Image (spheres, helix red, strand yellow):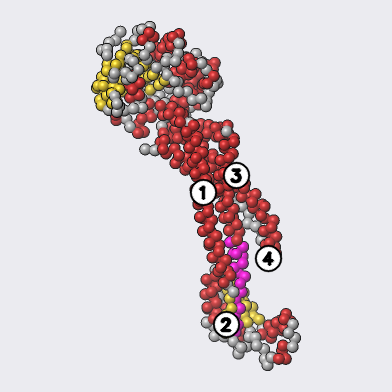
Amino acid sequence: MNRTEPENSNHWGPWSAWRAQHRVAAVTSWQKMVARPGATWLTWIVLAISLALPSAILLTLDNLRETLHGLSGAPQISVLLSLESNLAAADALREDVEAWPEVAIVSVVDRARALAEFIESSGFNSLPASLARNPLPHTLLVTPAEGLGAQAVARLATRLEAEVLVAQVVVDARWLERLEQMLRLGSRWVQGLGGAMILGAILVLANTLRLAVDARREEIQVVRLMGGSDAFARRPFLYTGVWYGAGGGLMATILVWGFGLWLSGPVNALLLLYDRPTQLLWLGPQYPLALILGSACLGWLAAWWVTERFFGH
Amino acid sequence: MIELDRVSRRFADRDALRHLSLTVPAGQMAFVTGHSGAGKSTLLKLLLLLDRPTGGEIRVQGDATHLIKGRAVAPYRRRFGAVFQEHRLLFDRNVHDNVALPLEIAGFSPRDITRRVRAALDKVGLLARERADPASLSGGEQQRVGIARAVVARPEFLVADEPTGNLDPGLSAEIMALFEAFNQVGVTVLVATHDLGLISRFRHRVITLESGHLVEPNTLP
């Protein structure tokens, strides 16, 4: 009964046996793939393209979000005070508002200076003579705190409006809201497209693996006849799936990296034009890692799915 | 010991085995013979759990095979070495790796595998062809590789289905002598063959089947 059990010599136990079986399955399935480089490369490339496209769009969105995050502090709120209020009252209000947590910087624009600047920039030199008095009020320029969202900016505006001296609050935050909405739409779009592309990748993998299983049908039968467990017979195919997946993920990383390199010139120039000294967000370590590991998992899943009809109960 | 107790295998159009009862004691070598369709292959398939009886019970060393299901099937099959007429070698690997397969399945260490594969190939006279591609071997050599694979993990039972079907008489006798040698070291051997001339040259028990029935009584020579 125990004659077929392995000898328990030289620290060789079930754990060593299990590892040895995995090593053999991993190495032989890799060798089989290398022996047919044409089919292997083709599968890797198809897989890489299916994964690289959503990844590249995801990277673009990440960049946009990063840029937007930098811009979100930029929209200033112009707080026009009532015409009766004087400069001292404006200064007092500035000190009050600057203490609010959602506010970063407040500056006071003197009504006389504002008029002078307006005349200078507009070229209406004869304007003061035709005006009985300065029509401009004192103004506070409020810069919201860093990272404040569009809704928080709107709430800040409402709070400012409630102040006694304030006549009108002007916020140009609608564009910010629109951009955020567009990004949200973009994310959905990537999720949908990415899902479809990944499904395509799984189908390509499954088809390749199905052909591999069909070609090795005899091997599966012989292994079972020799008393190999289903897990043993299945193992080479699961490793084949992992190798296809990991290779495709690695190639997808290279594709996205090349795409980023190709785009970085124009994008960085564009950012410079906007006086933003930031650089294009580069591939963080999470991209290659997620691509290769995720893709290897996909390969394993596809192999499991394909072999299920042989080994499923 | 292999015991068959009123074993039947009914197919839609015919009965392959009908109430077959016989006992093969441990350590015996027996030939199973009869015309094609007499039930020889069916009997071996039932023993390897490649098929299940529609009636009766088979016991192997006292274990009723109808209770061996699911995950228990693989360890049960490891107690058998099987040889087929068409060899069933894997042509994507060399002779050594073909013979090593049962040892890999059983979880032997690489060192033990090498040692045992060499010993098995030496016994069938093919140690020199260890690294050869099975397709480059002659029919008789391929069958000897198949036998080496069947015995390498030292099974309790060796079953062979028409192992000499494609071989000339000289080679057939050589193969049978190999089975005899394994039987002499304690392996229970069951060989299905229709080659009566070959059987007559060996003095072993003969189990004759006809239309799924046992024709001759269980007589030991």
Locate residue A305: give its quadrant: top left
The answer to the question of whether label 4 and label 3 lie on touching residues, with beta carbons closer than 8 A, is no
Residue drawn at x 47%, y 34% is: A213
Whether residue A183 sits left or right of residue B35 in the image: it is right
Dot 3 crowding, Cα within 10 Å, few <14, some 14–19, many 20+? many
Q: Residue furthest front?
A: B13
In terms of secondary structure, where does tag 3 sit? helix
Labels 1 and 3 positioned on one and the same chain: yes
Label 2 chain ID: A
Q: Is residue A28 visible?
A: yes
Which dot, 1 or 3, sits closer to the camera?
1
Q: Given the image, on which type of amino acid does mark 2 rest?
A: Gln
Q: Which residues are magenta?
A: A65-81
Dot 2 crowding, Cα within 10 Å, few <14, some 14–19, many 20+? some
Q: CA distance from mark 2 to mark 1?
A: 52 Å
Q: Check disc 2 and report the residue beneath it.
A: A168
Q: Check disc 1 and report the residue beneath it.
A: A198
- Could you tell me which quadrant the C terminus of chain B lies in? top left
Q: Look at the picture and state if A213 lies above or below A281.
A: above
Q: How many marks?
A: 4
Whether residue B41 sits left or right of residue A153 in the image: it is left
Q: Check disc 4 and report the residue beneath it.
A: A274
The answer to the question of whether label 1 and label 3 lie on touching residues, with beta carbons closer than 8 A, is no
- Mark 4 or mark 2: whose residue is earlier in sequence: 2
Q: In this view of the protein, which residue sits in the foreground, B131 or A93?
A: B131
Label 4 chain ID: A
Q: Given the image, on which type of amino acid does mark 1 rest?
A: Ile
